Amino acid sequence: MSEVKISAEPRTEFGKGGARRTRRAGLVPAVLYGHGEKPQHIALPAREFAAAIRHGGLNQVFTIDITGNSGTTLALPKAIQRDPIKDTYEHVDLLIVKRGEKVQVDVPITLTGEAARNTLVVHESTTLAVVAEAMHLPSSIEVSIEGLEAGSQVTAGDVRLPQGSELAVEPDFVLAIISQAQTAEQLEGGEAAEGEATEGEAEGASEE
């Protein structure tokens, strides 16, 4: 994953009021920390940040150029607060990273292919924790479920990781389960049985 250069401004207003004014100005309140550095409160341009996340995912690495600071800082989003109604970013925690160091991230999992007929795919986890070099983090990982029969499981150990990435969970960590889907006849039979049980309860209540 390539890094994205983004400008930032020092943030001097804090609290809910300050955060609202920052967002009204088209900026996202953020805090930059890590590697023994004193936390820095900054504001990122909202449109540029959102575009970078859409393109590179939540594990996008940023080269941050803070006004008034000499040099730039590499950072990775560690916590993002988002308004689901407005679809805007409310606040971002950014972790300072260094070239060559390894970090742990949660990578989105995409299931590809079709399981066997009359099966149901149950997602146990939509992400997988991996350890990778900060400048080569996978944006997503694909896992095939093509032809899997009912009773099958997809575990972390089944995933083919990108080169340079390692599992941060046990190999038996379950990502998805393939179960037997109920047929139309089974569903109808279950509804009929439920209806009979309800009628029986009603009759018993009336006799009392």
Image: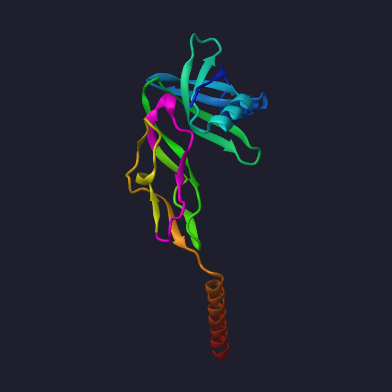
The answer to whether residue 148 is magenta is: yes
Left or right of 17: which side holds 2?
Answer: left
In percent of width and height, residue 208 lies at 54, 89
Q: In this view, does 129 lie above or below 29?
A: below
Residue drawn at 66 percent across, 38 percent down: 86
Residue drawn at 45 percent across, 42 percent down: 127
In percent of width and height, residue 199 lies at 57, 83
In percent of width and height, residue 165 lies at 37, 33
Residue 143: name its quadrant.
top left
In percent of width and height, residue 72 lies at 49, 14
The residue nearer to you, when weighing 158 against 46, is 158
The residue nearer to you, when weighing 110 against 16, is 110
**Count of numbered marks:** 0
- Can you name the residue that lies furthest to the bottom here? 207
The residue nearer to you, when weighing 19 against 75, is 75
The residue nearer to you, when weighing 192 against 88, is 192
Q: Bounds of the magenta span?
A: 130-151
Q: Can residue 153 be seen in this view?
A: yes
Residue 205: name its quadrant.
bottom right
Q: Can residue 10 be seen in this view?
A: no
Left or right of 173: which side holds 202?
Answer: right
